[in-house]
Amino acid sequence: MSDVGRLLIFAGIVLVVVGVVVSVLGSALPLGRLPGDLNFGRGNTRVSIPIATSIVLSIILTILANIFFRLFGR
């Protein structure tokens, strides 16, 4: 049961940190507007394909998951 508690504490800390970063740097972060993101629009229709943003977020989440499993792994 202590492992579940540690997991919840870690997840809470990560959510708080992400929330603070997004609220403070929300407009300064170029996520969704990186050079590899595709945006198309015509009239009232917009299509956004965030390829580069997805890759960046994947790398960040992989690093965080590796840190988590090194700290709390079996």
Image (cartoon, rainbow, N blue to C red):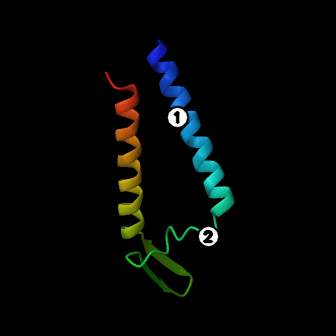
45 left or right of 54 in image: right
In this rendering, the answer to whether 17 lies above or below 3 is below
Residue under the image location 49 percent in, 70 percent down: 32
**At numbered mark 2, what does the secondary structure look like: helix, strand or loop?**
loop
Where does the image place residue 5, in percent across and percent down from the top left? 52, 20
Name the residue that disc number 2 marks. Answer: 28
Mark 2 Cα-neighbour bin, 10 Å: few <14, some 14–19, many ≥20: few
Between 2 and 71, which is closer to the camera in this rendering?
71
Mark 2–mark 1 distance (CA, rounded to whole Å): 25 Å
Between 15 and 64, which is closer to the camera in this rendering?
64
Where does the image place residue 56, in percent across and percent down from the top left? 39, 61
7 left or right of 29 in image: left
Residue under the image location 35 percent in, 32 percent down: 69
Q: Residue furthest right?
A: 24
Reading the chain from its start, which is encountered first: label 2 or label 1? 1
Q: Residue furthest bottom?
A: 43
Residue under the image location 41 percent in, 53 percent down: 60
The quadrant the C terminus occupies is top left
| Count of residue discs | 2
12 left or right of 72 in image: right
In this rendering, the answer to whether 19 lies above or below 4 is below
In this rendering, the answer to whether 53 lies above or below 39 is above
Mark 1 Cα-neighbour bin, 10 Å: few <14, some 14–19, many ≥20: few
> In which image quadrant can residue 59 be found?
bottom left
Name the residue that disc number 1 marks. Answer: 11
* Amino acid on which the number 2 mark rests in the picture: Ala
